[in-house]
Image (spheres, rainbow, N blue to C red):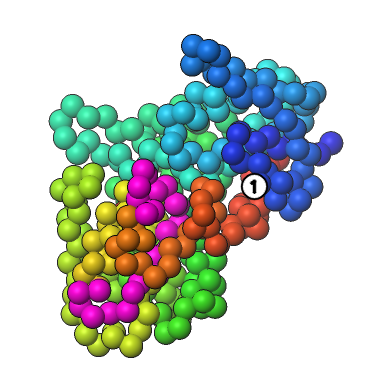
């Protein structure tokens, strides 16, 4: 019997793509809110003895986690043999240490909650910084899809003479990987974040890159302050208007508009979170990782 794939609301496009790539059967689920704000979920088909996977990207996670965990319970109680999760964007990976006394390390708790409810996990470039490997916070089998190949392919085909730029030390890992695959030079800047929207970025000597097109690459664009600061510095240093590439287009509140206004020539993202900036499709890479974990 074919495995079944279930979309949490908003994830239907990726579900269709995975169903096509992996010959899965789409099964509908109702995910609603009662008038008092509590979640109500129901699996709408018989899935007895079938392997199942739920697709739910986890931007704006507080609205999604309760219904997702309830849906995983409903799927199991409906008789599924196993339940996997495809979460192209994995939230809560940035609170990966106790920055101030009294805080908690959210990444560990969210990882433990999700690990208790599903049997395996596939995600795309989770924010691995102080946590070096997903297995430190997820106790279930997992696969990480890297966007570097797809981003590099886009850069190679769309940008003339690119100079790849990582806005901070953390970005060195993915900007280096993209640069190598795009056969382009790269530099990494230094970032000081003083608050959610207070970011300072230092730019090394960039004069000899005047003939290149700067391409900023970061894993997450949330408030976009990191990219906005960097765009400002590069423009003041006389470089061309930069192309901004984010793997995960979180774009909180007015961030997208603000980044455009700051002078980005183009804003591009992978399709891990549906957004008008999506240009880089990752379904084939996600499907390849799902194939490795789906029993
Ligand atoms: C930092 O740890 C991440 O890699 C990104 O640089 C960061 O999340 C970007 O955040 P924002 O868009 O709010 O500056």
Please give the name of the residue rendered at 43% of the width and 67% of the height, measured from the top-left corner.
Answer: 266
For the residue pair 78 and 34, the one nearer the viewer reads as 34
The picture places residue 188, in percent across and down from the top left corner, at 27, 69
Residue 282 higher or lower than 242, as above or below = above
Horizontal arrangement in the rendering, residue 228 relative to residue 16 (left or right): left
Mark 1 neighbour density, 10 Å: few (under 14) some (14–19) many (20 or more): many
For the residue pair 100 and 206, the one nearer the viewer reads as 206
Is disc 1's CB within 8 Å of ligand 1? no
The picture places residue 150, in percent across and down from the top left corner, at 54, 66
**SS label for mark 1:** helix
Which residues, given as a range, are shown in magenta?
235-257
The picture places residue 219, in percent across and down from the top left corner, at 40, 56
Q: Quadrant of residue 39?
A: top right
Please give the name of the residue rendered at 39% of the width and 65% of the height, measured from the top-left corner.
Answer: 244
For the residue pair 45 and 37, the one nearer the viewer reads as 37
The residue carrying mark 1 is 14
Horizontal arrangement in the rendering, residue 113 relative to residue 13 (left or right): left
Asked if residue 24 shows in the view, the reply is yes
Residue 7 higher or lower than 192, as above or below = above
Residue at the outermost top position: 36
Please give the name of the residue rendered at 26% of the width and 39% of the height, measured from the top-left corner.
Answer: 97
**Quadrant showing the N terminus:** top right
Horizontal arrangement in the rendering, residue 172 relative to residue 246 (left or right): left
The picture places residue 93, in percent across and down from the top left corner, at 37, 42
**Quadrant showing the C terminus:** top right
Please tell me whether residue 251 belongs to the stretch shown in magenta. Answer: yes
Please give the name of the residue rendered at 44% of the width and 52% of the height, measured from the top-left corner.
Answer: 249
């Amino acid at each position: 019997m074919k495995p079944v794939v279930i979309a949490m609301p908003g994830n239907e496009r990726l579900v269709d793509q995975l169903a096509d790539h992996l010959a899965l059967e789409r099964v509908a689920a109702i995910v609603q809110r009662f008038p008092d704000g509590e979640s109500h979920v129901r699996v709408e088909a018989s899935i007895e003895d079938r392997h199942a996977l739920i697709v739910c990207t986890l931007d704006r996670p507080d609205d999604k986690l309760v219904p997702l965990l309830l849906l995983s319970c409903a799927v199991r109680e409906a008789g599924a043999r196993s339940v996997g999760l495809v979460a192209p964007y994995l939230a809560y990976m940035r609170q990966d240490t106790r920055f101030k006394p009294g805080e908690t390390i959210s990444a560990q708790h969210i990882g433990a909650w999700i690990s208790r409810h599903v049997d395996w996990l596939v995600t795309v470039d989770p924010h691995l910084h102080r946590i070096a490997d997903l297995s430190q916070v997820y106790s279930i089998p997992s696969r990480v899809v890297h966007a570097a190949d797809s981003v590099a392919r886009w850069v190679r085909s769309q940008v003339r003479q690119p100079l790849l730029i990582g806005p901070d030390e953390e970005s060195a890992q993915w900007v280096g990987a993209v640069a190598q695959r795009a056969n382009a030079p790269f530099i990494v800047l230094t970032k000081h974040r003083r608050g959610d929207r207070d970011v300072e970025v230092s730019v090394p000597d960039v004069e000899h890159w005047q003939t290149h097109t700067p391409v900023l690459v970061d894993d997450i664009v949330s408030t976009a302050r990191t990219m906005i600061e960097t765009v400002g510095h590069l423009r003041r240093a006389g470089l061309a208007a930069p192309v901004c590439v984010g793997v995960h287009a979180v774009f909180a509140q007015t961030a997208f508009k603000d980044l455009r206004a700051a002078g980005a020539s183009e804003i591009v993202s992978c399709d891990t979170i549906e957004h008008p900036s999506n240009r880089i499709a990752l379904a084939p890479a996600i499907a390849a990782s799902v194939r490795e974990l789906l029993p």
